[in-house]
Image: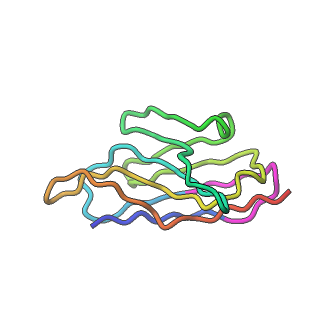
Amino acid sequence: QVQLVESGGGLVQAGGSLRLSCAASGNIFSIESMRWYRQPPGKQRELVATLTSGGSTNYVNSVKGRFTISRDNAKNTVYLQMNSLKPEDTAVYYCNADVWVVAPRRLNNYWGQGAQVTVSS
């Protein structure tokens, strides 16, 4: 099937930067939208950023101007550049993708395993 593997999480001081990566592999024909979600401790998972196959982006208000989602289609990889990090950005970050698998041709939704991002004050 398809696997999404995240990397790049860690501990950073407030005001710092991190870049998350999520590489998709497996039985992939093409990838539609790719997204980043996050789940802070004790809270619900929220959608942070979306990037469609056509290049359109959308961000939750709290990260606009600080986070940038991008993708490398040749590598089936999506990135989340996070700048000016705040303690309230502390969460487990998950990538999510709508993937057309090769056979049988079907559009499925997949999740990564999550990457911890901790921002200290």
Residue visible at 48% across and 67% down in the picture: 113
In percent of width and height, residue 62 lies at 67, 39
- Residue 57 appears at what percent x and percent y? 49, 34
Q: Is residue 95 left or right of residue 117?
A: left
Q: Establish if 68 lies above or below 113.
A: above
Q: Which secondary structure dominates the residues rendered in magenta? A: strand
Return the residue found at the far left. 104
Give residue 18's position: percent from left, percent from top.
Answer: 68, 55
Give the residue at x 18% y 57%.
102
Give the residue displayed 58% in from the left and 58% down from the top: 93
How is colour applied across the structure in the image?
A: rainbow
57 horizontally vs 120: left or right: left
> Looking at the rendering, in which quadrant would you find the N terminus?
bottom left
Residue 47 image offset from top left, x and y in percent: 53, 46
* Quadrant in which residue 63 is drawn: top right
Residue 28 drawn in magenta: no
Q: Is residue 96 left or right of residue 13?
A: left
Number of dots carrying numbers: 0
User: Could you tell me which residue is drawn at 76 percent across and 58 percent down?
Assistant: 119
Residue 43, quarter of picture: bottom right
Image quadrant holding the C terminus, namely bottom right
Q: Which residues are magenta?
A: 10-20
